[in-house]
Image (cartoon, helix red, strand yellow):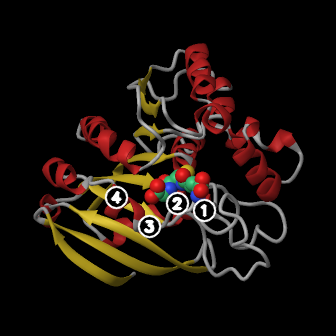
Amino acid sequence: MELLGQHRCFGGTQRFYRHDASSIGLPMRLAVFVPPQAEHEARPALFYLAGLTCTEETFPIKAGAQRLAAELGLILVAPDTSPRGAGIAGESDHWDFGVGAGFYLDATTEPWQRHYRMESYLTRELPELLAQTLPLDRQRLGICGHSMGGHGALTLALRHRGLFRSVSALAPVAAPSDCPWGVKAFTGYLGPDRSTWAAHDASALMAASSEAPFPDGILIDQGLADQFLTEQLLPERFEAACAKVGQPLTLRRHEGYDHGYYFVSSFIGDHLRFHAERLNRP
Ligand SMILES: N[C@@H](CCC(=O)N[C@@H](CS)C(=O)NCC(=O)O)C(=O)O
């Protein structure tokens, strides 16, 4: 991993890295906050997946999570939202598909399947690489995300049982098979056969579970003034699926909050505490 920049921050360091990602076949960038406690011992890590149009810089710059992460001793890992530089014609033409919109899955269609492999990158390559490079306890990983990243957090946690001990989301795309962003992404990355989509749809995955996958609970925050709430996010679908399988879910609906980072920064602290509590258990 090539260290591109390092900044002292609340006694720890905010770092930016670039590395050759073998699962993607291209260089990837990521941001990592290392809390002061990591100088002495391996610490738990929270992966944060950002939403459409974001980069690895969005979370460290806008969410304001470092102060509390330093107190809690949490490493924060913020990857990019898609491969960049794949050279696919038109890959930057849409803000909700292609560059900046990788949807945290492995594409199975041409021309995307060679490089658009965010799921393999995040679940196989990155935990291993980070554990080799940083004082990170590989057995204590949590995942959270916002919007498309909320979809990523929920689906990766549900698809890779045991990899992430705790999961939460802010304004997640909760039923992507049934919203315009998800239909566009799944059609493009997985093809038109809808039977392949359910495996990447948090509500469908939860509804298909035989028992509660996260008995310690899942936390979701949602703003009620979110401009994408009723057309794209559909948290009530995930809520119904959790109820069906007995999955404990705290879904908090907040009057007046919209979709952006003023909302994320208002509630990210509760997510850090939620994860720290679960990741610090022996
Ligand atoms: N570009 C879109 C909005 C995209 C958007 O809201 N992205 C969210 C994630 S889905 C975000 O976090 N944007 C970055 C930011 O708010 O700083 C639009 O013009 O409507």
Residue matched to label 3 = 56
Task: Choose between 139 and 257: the one closer to the eye.
Answer: 257
For the residues carrying marks 2 and 4, which lies nearer the camera in this image?
4
242 in relation to 69, above or below: above
Q: Does 80 sit left or right of 159 as displayed? A: left
The disc label shown at residue 4, or none = none
Neighbor class of circle 2 (other Cα within 10 Å; few <14, some 14-19, many 20+) is some
Instruction: Kindly indicate the quadrant of the structure image that contains residue 15.
Output: bottom left
Disc 1 residue type (three-letter):
Met
Q: Which amino acid does label 3 sit on?
A: Glu
What amino acid does circle 2 point to? Answer: Leu
For the residue with label 4, is its CB less than 8 Å from the closest atom of ligand 1? yes
Q: Looking at the picture, does residue 170 appear above or below residue 64?
A: above
Quarter of the figure with residue 60? bottom left
Residue 272 on image: x %, y %: 28, 43
Which residue is label 4 attached to?
62
| Lower position in the chain sequence, tag 1 or tag 4 | 4
Nearer the observer, 234 or 239: 234
Residue 97 location (% of width, % of height) = 70, 61
**Tag 4 secondary structure:** helix
x 40%, y 50%: residue: 261
Which residue is outermost to the right?
193
Mark 4 and mark 3: Cα distance apart in space: 11 Å
Q: Position of residue 244 (x, y in %)?
A: 61, 14
The alpha-carbon separation of the residues under discs 1 and 3 comes to: 13 Å
Between residue 188 and residue 116, name the one nearer to us.
Answer: 188
Give the residue pinned by disc 1.
118
* Few, some or many residues within 10 Å of mark 1 (<14, 14–19, 20+): many
